[in-house]
Amino acid sequence: MTAMDQPSPADQAIAADHVIKRFGDGDSVVRALDDVSVTIAKGEFFTLLGPSGCGKTTLLRCIAGFETPTSGRILLSGRDITREPPNRRRVNTVFQSYALFPHLTVAQNVAFGLEMLGKPRAEVSRTVDRMLSLVRLDAFAARRPDALSGGQQQRVALARALATQPEVLLLDEPLSALDLKLRKEMQSELKRLQHETGITFVFVTHDQEEALTMSDRIGVMSAGKLLQVGPPREIYNRPVNRFVADFIGETNFLPALVEDGQVRLTSGEVVGQGQGQGRVTVAIRPEQLHLALPGDGGAIPATVEGSTYLGTDSHVQLRLVDGSRLVARVPSQPSGDLALPAGTQVGLRVAPGAVQVLAD
Amino acid sequence: MAEPRPFSVTRLPGFTAIAITAFVALYLPIITIVVFSFNALSSMSQWGGFSLHWYREAWANDTVQEATIRSLLIATVAALVSTVVATLAALGTTRQGRFRGRTAIYALINQPLMVPEIVTAVSLLIVFGAIRQATGYQGLGYLMLAHSAFCVPFAYLPIRARLEGMDRTLELAAADLYATPLQAFRRITLPLLMPGIAAGAMLAFVISLDDVVITEFVKSAGQDTLATYMLGQFRRTLTPEVNAISTALLALTLVLLTGFFLITRKRA
Amino acid sequence: MAMSSSAETAAARRRGRSGWLLSTPALVLLLLGAAGPLLVVLAFSLLSKGEYGGVALPVSGQAWFEIFFQRDIFDGTISPAKAHLAIFWRSVWLSLATTLITFVLGLPTAWFIATRPERQRALWLFLITIPFWTNLLIRTFAIMEVIRNEGLLNTTLIAMGAIDQPLQILFTDWATLIGMAYVYLPLMVLPLYAAIDRFDMRLLEAGYDLYASRWRLLRRVILPIVRPGIVAGCILVFIPSLGAYVTPRVLGGGTNMMVGNFIELQFGQARNWPLGASLSMALLIIVMVALLVYVRASAREGRDG
C-alpha cells in the first residue's frame, strides 16, 4: 500500500482500528470481523466489497453503532466513538430494506432526524423541501412510503439519511432490491448526490461491477478480513491474492515458475516479469489475451475447445499444450465473427504487463 | 343435454354439500333467535308479526338494565387492564431477545387458555370466598380481577403477533436518526403497534362480555351480568326477551369483530 | 477476551431482567386471578371434608380415593364408585363423539373455504369466526330452540310426516352432544383451514397425473400433509368438551351431568369440597396430558417436515 492511501488525520472521516467482532460463544464462535483496520478520507466514496457473510455489513453496523466491536476502536474524525449509541453518532445509514417509517409521510420521514436533533420548525421544513428536491421527489412529500415505487422509496431513504448532514453516510447494499435498469440509474444518482453534498459515503455491496464503477477506493473483504484496499484500477489490475483476483472480474489462473524475475508458464513460454521465486500462480485477465495465427513469432500455441457468443464479445475456451485451460475474450466484429470451431489451432499473445503473480 | 362438469383438481366428492350443510347448521339457529326477537307474540315458535316489543320489555326490566351496565363496566375494565399488562409483557417477551425464563412467562400468560374454565372458576370461588369472609368486601372488584386475568392471553396474542411482524430495522433507523430509545418507542414502535393493541383490547372486551362460567362462580349476590342473567332465565319459561338480549349482544360482538378484522387486515 | 464475554453475558442478563420486569404486571395479575388459586385447589384436594362444607385437617388422600372408589358405610368393603365412573365415562365418550362429528363436518368445510377464490376466502372465514366469537350461551340457547319439542327440528319433521310425536332430544345426552358439536365446530374448522391453506394444491395435479383417484388422493396425500391441523383441531375440540359446563347444564338437564357439572355439585349441594378439588385436579391433569401429547406430536411433525 502506498502512502497516498492513508489519509492524514485531519482528512480522516472514519477509521476502524484493529476491530474484532465475534458472535456467539463457546464452540460456535464466529469471527465476523478479524482484526480490520482501515481509514476512510473525508469526501471519499469508499466501497466495502465481498461475498455475503464476509463481514462487510458487520463493519458497517459497527460504524453505525448497531454492533459493538468485541475489541478495537471506531474513530469518527479522529474521535473514539466505539461505545457511543447510534443516536449520538453523526453517522446515518441507508438500510438495505430502506426501513422507511410506514406510518409517516415522505416529508415526515425526511424530517424525523432533524426533529430528533431539535432543529427549529422553520429550518426543518426548509431542509425537507431542499432534500426532496435534491432527490427529485418534491411532488411526493405528502405520500406514504407504501404508495411509492422501489426506486422512489430508495430516494426517500437517501433524503432522510442526508437531511441531517451526517459526517458519514453508510449505505448497506441499497441497490440490491432494484431491477437492473433502475440500479444503473440510481448508481449515477448516488454519485451525483455525493458530489453535491460532499459527504463521505461508505457503500457496501457484493456486486463487483457496481464497486468498480462508483468508488474512489474499494476495500475487498473475505471471511472477516480486509484483504486489499485501493482504487478500482489497482484492485482490478494488481490483485494481491487469488481471492481478490477471482472475485473481481474474470481471471485465468495458471501455474508458473519465476526465475530471475521472468515468469514462465509450465508449458514453457515466458509471459512477463514478476517478483518472487519458484512455483507460483499467475492471473491473466481474459481480455488481455489476444488470438494470433499459430506459429506466429512468440505466440503460445493453443487449441480451441469451444466458444460462447456474448454480444459485445465472445469467450473462447482454450487448452495449452501442457493441458491447462484458459479463456480469452475476443471482441465481436461488425463484419461477422471469426469461425473458431473446436480443434482449431491458434496462437496466444499476452498483453504486456498483464501477468499478475499472486501471493497465494 | 347437460354438459359434463369440467374437471377440477380441488373438488372432492360430497365436500361442498357437507360444507354448505355445516354453514346452514351454524347459522340457522342463530338466525332463528334473531328473527323471533322481533316476534309480536310471546311464543318462540309461532310468528305473530314484526314488533320491537321484546326489546322495549328487556330494556324496561331493571335487572336487565343493571346487568347490561355491569357487563359493559366489567368488560371495559378487563379490556383496559389486560391490554396494558399484555402490551408490557409482549414488549418484554419479544424485544429483549431470548432470556432465561421466557418460556415460563409464555406458559403463565397462556395458562387461562389451557385450564378448563370450570377449574379456574371453582378455584376463584374458594379463594375469593375466603377473601370475602376475611375482609367483608363484596364489590365488583372480584369479577374485574378475574376477568382482567383471563383476558390477558387474548389481548397478548395479537399484540405479540404485531410486534413479531414489525421490522426491527425501523427502530434501528430511528436510533440512527438521533432518536433516544424512549423517542424511538413513542414515535415509531408505539404508533406501529397501535393496531395490535386495539385488536387485543377488542378481543378482550368480547371475551369478558361472553364469559359465563367464571362469572357465575365469582359473582356475589345481585351481581348478575347479562350472560349469567340469561343462564338463570333458562331455568324458567322463556320469552322472546332472551332473544332480544341475545340479538343485542350478538350485534355488539359483530361490530367489535368487524372492527377487529378491519384493523388487523390493514397492513400498516 | 474474558472481559468482552463477561460484558456480553452482562448484556444478556440486563435484557433478561427487563424482560421479566415488563412482564411482571401481567404475571402478578395472572397469579392473583388465575394461576395462584389453582394451587389452593390442589391443597384442598389433599384435605378432609369440613363438617359444614369447606375443608378441614388432617391431610388425607381420601378425596382422590373417592374419585374412583367407595367404601361401604356398614361393612367397609371397597367397590368402584360406579356413579363417578359413569360421569367420567359420559364426559369422555361425549367429548370423543363431539370431536368425531366436528371433524367429519369440519374437514369438508375447511376444504371448501380453502378452495374458494382468493377474494372470497376472507369472507367465508369471517362467517366461521362469527359463531366462534359469539357468546357461548347464545349459541347454546340457539341450538336449544332448534331441538326442543316445539322447536324447528321437531315441527319440520312432523310437518314432513316423518314422525307424529315430537322426539324428546332436550335433556338427554344427545342434546349435549348436538350442542357441543354445534358450539365447538368453529374450533375444528379454523386449524384445519390453516393447515389446508398451506397445502400446495399442485400436489393434487401431480397425484392425478400419477393416476390417483380422488379418494386415494384424500387418504394418501391430503390427510397426511394436513395432519398437524387435524391434531390441533381435535385437541382444540376435545379439551373444552371434556371440561364443558354450560352446554350440559342447559341442554343435558340436571341428571345428565358431565365432569364440569359434577365438580360444581361438590361445591354446592353435595358440600364435598375436597372431592370437588380432587376432581378439578384430575380434569386438569387429563387436559395437560392431552396438551402434552399435542405439543410432542407437533414438535415431531416440525422435525420431520
Image (spheres, helix red, strand yellow):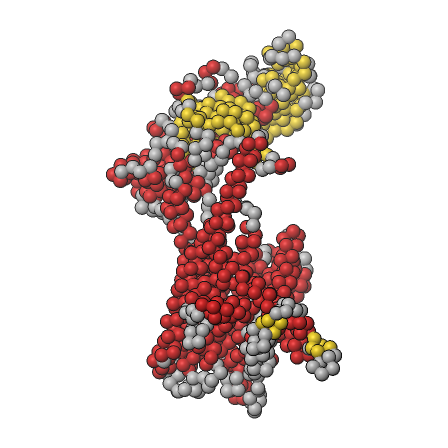
**Frontmost residue, A33 versus A292:** A33
Figure check: C126 above or below B237 = above
> Where residue B100 sits in the image (x, y, percent)?
56, 47
> Where residue C239 sits in the image (x, y, percent)?
59, 67
Identify the residue at the far bottom of this view. C164
> Where residue C123 sits in the image (x, y, percent)?
46, 64
Q: Which residue is found at the position 60% from the left and 37% from the top? A: A25
Q: Quadrant of the N terminus of chain C?
A: top right
Figure check: B22 above or below A171 = below
Asked whether residue A79 appears in the rendered view, the answer is yes
> Where residue C3 sits in the image (x, y, percent)?
55, 32
Q: Which residue is found at the position 70% from the left and 75% from the top? A: C69
- Would you identify the image quadrant in which residue C222 lies? bottom right
**Frontmost residue, A187 versus C305:** C305
Asked whether residue A45 appears in the rendered view, the answer is no
**Frontmost residue, C31 versus C292:** C31
